């Protein structure tokens, strides 16, 4: 429980910043660009879920790999997701590896859910997207809590490092 508490204490401030970014992005898209989603409140809520899930994944990378390597892993993860999600180009026009990764790509579910909130016609794909992103959120936080708990336990070598001359 201590690991989860420490993970959540660093997670919430970042999530509040992400929530502010969601509000600004929604306002710009709606009032600046003129996007008129069929389900504006649902779109806002889904965007918050997307932010929560991906923020938890980034935190998990940082806890497990350390901040420097975690940031590099996060960037690599983001690049792969952008290509495989089908958000920029239709999936059939992308390279074969991206087509193979598409069903496993969390961003694919984010794109699908946002499209349905914007254009309407909500079906099972939306609820699948909610379940997948919710699951990613919970699993990432659980792994982060485990990693934080593991990182707080010191070995004798860490407490008394060998002296090198």
Image (cartoon, rainbow, N blue to C red):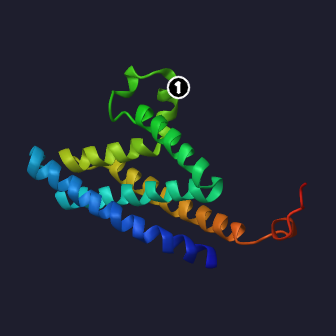
Looking at the picture, tell me which residue is in the foreground, 127 or 162. Answer: 162
Label 1 packing within 10 angstroms: few (<14), some (14-19), many (20+): few
The image position of residue 16, as x and y in percent, is 35, 68
From the image, tell me which residue sits under label 1.
97
Q: Look at the image and tell me whether residue 142 can be seen.
A: yes
Q: Look at the image and tell me whether residue 104 can be seen.
A: no
Quadrant containing the N terminus is: bottom right
Q: Residue at x 44, y 60 (%)?
A: 134
Quadrant containing the C terminus is: bottom right
The image position of residue 162, as x and y in percent, is 90, 61
Q: How many discs mark residues in the rendered view?
A: 1
Q: Give the structural element (helix, strand or loop) at label 1.
A: helix
Looking at the picture, tell me which residue is in the foreground, 15 or 158. Answer: 158
Q: Report which quarter residue 143 is drawn in.
A: bottom right
Left/right of residue 114 with respect to residue 98 in the rendered view: left
Looking at the picture, tell me which residue is in the foreground, 106 or 11. Answer: 11
The image position of residue 60, as x and y in percent, is 57, 57
Q: Residue at x 36, y 54 (%)?
A: 127
Left/right of residue 129 with respect to residue 156 in the rendered view: left
Q: Residue at x 16, y 48 (%)?
A: 29
The image position of residue 98, as x and y in percent, is 48, 28
């Amino acid at each position: 429980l201590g690991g989860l508490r420490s993970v959540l204490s660093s997670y919430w401030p970042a999530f509040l910043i992400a929530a502010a970014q969601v509000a600004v992005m929604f306002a710009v898209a709606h009032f600046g660009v003129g996007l008129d989603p069929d389900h504006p409140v649902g779109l806002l809520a889904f965007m918050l879920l997307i932010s929560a899930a991906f923020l938890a994944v980034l935190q998990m990378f940082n806890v497990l790999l350390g901040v420097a390597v975690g940031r590099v892993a996060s960037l690599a993860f983001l690049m792969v997701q952008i290509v495989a999600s089908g958000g920029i180009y239709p999936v059939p026009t992308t390279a074969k590896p991206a087509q193979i990764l598409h069903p496993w790509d969390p961003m694919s579910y984010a794109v699908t859910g946002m499209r349905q909130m914007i254009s309407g016609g909500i079906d099972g794909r939306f609820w699948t997207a909610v379940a997948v992103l919710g699951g990613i959120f919970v699993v990432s936080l659980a792994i982060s809590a485990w990693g934080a708990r593991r990182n707080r336990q010191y070995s004798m070598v860490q407490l008394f490092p060998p002296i090198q001359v």
